[in-house]
């Protein structure tokens, strides 16, 4: 999927301490000028209209089960992870996501 085609990005989380909420907020700011809606949802409740799912690598299998074949971008650290930086660049400039 090309990043320019993403309209809804989901940050999926597990019961945690709010780090994924901070990531979702950061992504909203970074993508403010893009036509992308960023939402934060539990990993077991990924909406069917999601275009791409972002989650911690420890949740990847659970996210894949609910993502209905949508690209999943996994990260190791909540702030400044290269995978998330690459995703933001693909959305802003075009480029493959989930390749």
Image: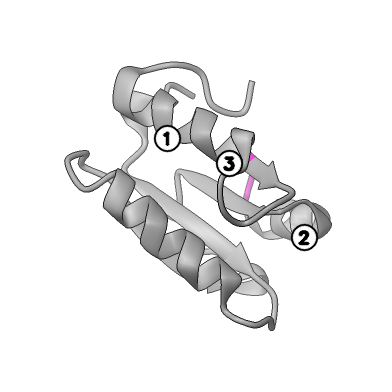
Q: Which residue in the protein does label 3 denote?
A: 70
Give the residues drawn in magenta, as a range: 68-72
**The C terminus sits in image quarter:** top right
Q: Quick one: label 1, few (<14), some, or many (20+) residues within 10 Å?
A: some
43 or 66: nearer the viewer: 43
Secondary element type, mark 2:
helix
Q: Identify the residue shown where x is 64% and y is 82%.
A: 17
Q: Residues within 10 Å of mark 2 (few under 14, many from 20)?
A: some
Mark 1 or mark 2, earlier in chain = 2
Q: Is residue 78 left or right of residue 22?
A: right
Which residue in the structure is indicated by mark 2?
59
**Residue at the image position 39 percent from the left and 52 percent from the top:** 27
Q: Which residue is mark 1?
A: 88
Residue shown at 42% from the left, 24% from the top? 90
Task: Report whether residue 48 is seen.
Answer: no
Q: Marks 3 and 1, how far apart in space? A: 17 Å
Q: Which residue is pictured at 57% across the width and 79% down the height?
A: 18
Query: Spatial distance from mark 3 to mark 2, Cα to Cα?
Result: 15 Å
Whichever of callouts 3 and 2 sits on the residue coming sooner in the sequence is 2
Q: Is residue 71 left or right of residue 88?
A: right
């Amino acid at each position: 999927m090309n990043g320019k085609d993403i309209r809804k990005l989901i940050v999926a989380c597990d019961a945690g301490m709010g780090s994924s909420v901070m990531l979702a907020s950061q992504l909203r700011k970074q993508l403010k000028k893009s036509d992308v809606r960023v939402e934060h949802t539990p990993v077991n409740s990924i909406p069917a209209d999601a275009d791409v799912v972002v989650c911690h690598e420890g949740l990847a299998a659970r996210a894949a089960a609910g993502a209905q074949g949508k690209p999943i971008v996994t990260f190791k650290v909540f702030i400044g992870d290269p995978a998330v930086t690459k995703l933001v660049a693909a959305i802003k400039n075009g480029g493959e996501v989930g390749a």
